[in-house]
Image (tube, helix red, strand yellow):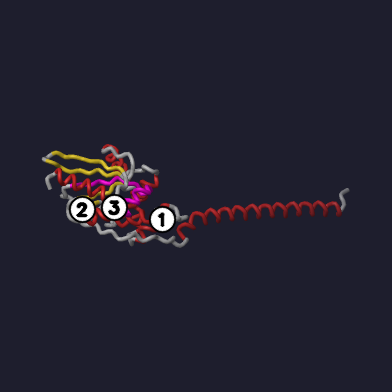
C-alpha cells in the first residue's frame, strides 16, 4: 500500500520536473528573442546611425553640361574618357588634369568631353558607382556625383556602399526616392555594359583611357591615350591634332 508520504514525494518530483521544463522553455524563448532582436538591429542600424562625414569636392567649372558630357558637341575634337570610380589613377586624373582641360580646351570650344563608366572593370562596385552617377544625371547632377565619389574614394567608412551612395545623393540634395528607385531598378545597367563594350572595341584595356576622335579632310581619325597623363600631354596631343586639321 502506497503511503501518503510516497505520494507527496512523487508529486514534489513531478512539480520539480515541471518547473525545470518551464525554466528551460523560458530560457530558450529568451535566447531566441535576443537573437531575433540582434538580427533586427543589424538590419536597421545602418539606416539609423548618423551619416559619416562627406568630403566636399573642389569646385570644377564645366561649360555646357549635358548629362555626362561637357563642352560644345560641335567641337572639332571629341574626347571620350573610359573610367572606373574604384581606380586610383582615374581619381588622380580628376583631381589634376581634368580641371585644366575643362578650363582651357573645353571652355574655348575646342574639345567636347564625355565621361563613360568602364563597366565592372574593377568589380561590381565599379558598375554600382557608375550607375549612381548616371542616376544623379537624371536630376542634372551627373558631374556633381562624379566629383563626390572620387573625392571620397580614399576616405574610411563603415557604411555599406548602397547606403553611402544614398548619403552622397542627400549631400547633393537630390530626390533620394527617385535616386534609389533608379539604382534599385538597374535603369543604367545596360548603358554601363554598353560603355564597356564600346571602350573595349576602341582598344581600351585599362582605366583611365581616352579615345580622341577628330576629322581631317572628311576622314574620321582616332587616337587612344591610356593612363592618367598630365595636362601637358593632352595639350601636346590636342595642339598636334589641330595642326593636322589645319587649325
C-alpha gap between disc 2 and disc 1: 34 Å
Q: Is residue 34 left or right of residue 201?
A: right
Residue at x 38% of width, y 55% of height: 165
Residue carrying label 1:
164
Q: Is residue 31 left or right of residue 73?
A: right
Name the residue nearer the viewer: 150 or 236. 236
C-alpha gap between disc 2 and disc 3: 12 Å
C-alpha gap between disc 3 and disc 1: 27 Å
Name the residue nearer the viewer: 152 or 10. 152
> Would you say the residues marked 2 and 1 are in contact, meaning their CB atoms lie under 8 Å apart?
no
Label 1's element?
A: helix
What numbered label is drawn on residue 18?
Answer: none
Q: Earlier in the sequence, mark 2 or mark 3?
A: 3
170 within the magenta span: no
Q: Earlier in the sequence, mark 3 or mark 1?
A: 3
Q: Is residue 97 left or right of residue 8?
A: left
Residue carrying label 2:
105
User: Where is residue 135 shown, x and y percent of the image?
Assistant: 31, 52
Residue carrying label 3:
97
Label 3's element?
A: helix
Segment colored magenta:
77-96
Amino acid at each position: 500500500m502506497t503511503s501518503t508520504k510516497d505520494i507527496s514525494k512523487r508529486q514534489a518530483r513531478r512539480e520539480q520536473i515541471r518547473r525545470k521544463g518551464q525554466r528551460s522553455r523560458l530560457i530558450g524563448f529568451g535566447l531566441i528573442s535576443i537573437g531575433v532582436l540582434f538580427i533586427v538591429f543589424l538590419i536597421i542600424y545602418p539606416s539609423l546611425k548618423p551619416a559619416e562625414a562627406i568630403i566636399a569636392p573642389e569646385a570644377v567649372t564645366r561649360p555646357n553640361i549635358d548629362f555626362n558630357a561637357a563642352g560644345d558637341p560641335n567641337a572639332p575634337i571629341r574626347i571620350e574618357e573610359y573610367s572606373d570610380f574604384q581606380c586610383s589613377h582615374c581619381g588622380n586624373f580628376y583631381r589634376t588634369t581634368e580641371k585644366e582641360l575643362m578650363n582651357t580646351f573645353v571652355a574655348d570650344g575646342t574639345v567636347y568631353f564625355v565621361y563613360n563608366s568602364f563597366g565592372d572593370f574593377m568589380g561590381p562596385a565599379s558598375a554600382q558607382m557608375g550607375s549612381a552617377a548616371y542616376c544623379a544625371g537624371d536630376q542634372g547632377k551627373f558631374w556633381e556625383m562624379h566629383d563626390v565619389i572620387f573625392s571620397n574614394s580614399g576616405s574610411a567608412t563603415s557604411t555599406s556602399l548602397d547606403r553611402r551612395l544614398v548619403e552622397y545623393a542627400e549631400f547633393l540634395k537630390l530626390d533620394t526616392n527617385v535616386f534609389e528607385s533608379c539604382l534599385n531598378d538597374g535603369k543604367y545597367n545596360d548603358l554601363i555594359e554598353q560603355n564597356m563594350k564600346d571602350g573595349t572595341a576602341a582598344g581600351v584595356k585599362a582605366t583611365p583611357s581616352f579615345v580622341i576622335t577628330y576629322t581631317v579632310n572628311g576622314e574620321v581619325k582616332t587616337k587612344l591615350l591610356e593612363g592618367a597623363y598630365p595636362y601637358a600631354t593632352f595639350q601636346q596631343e590636342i595642339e598636334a591634332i589641330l595642326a593636322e586639321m589645319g587649325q
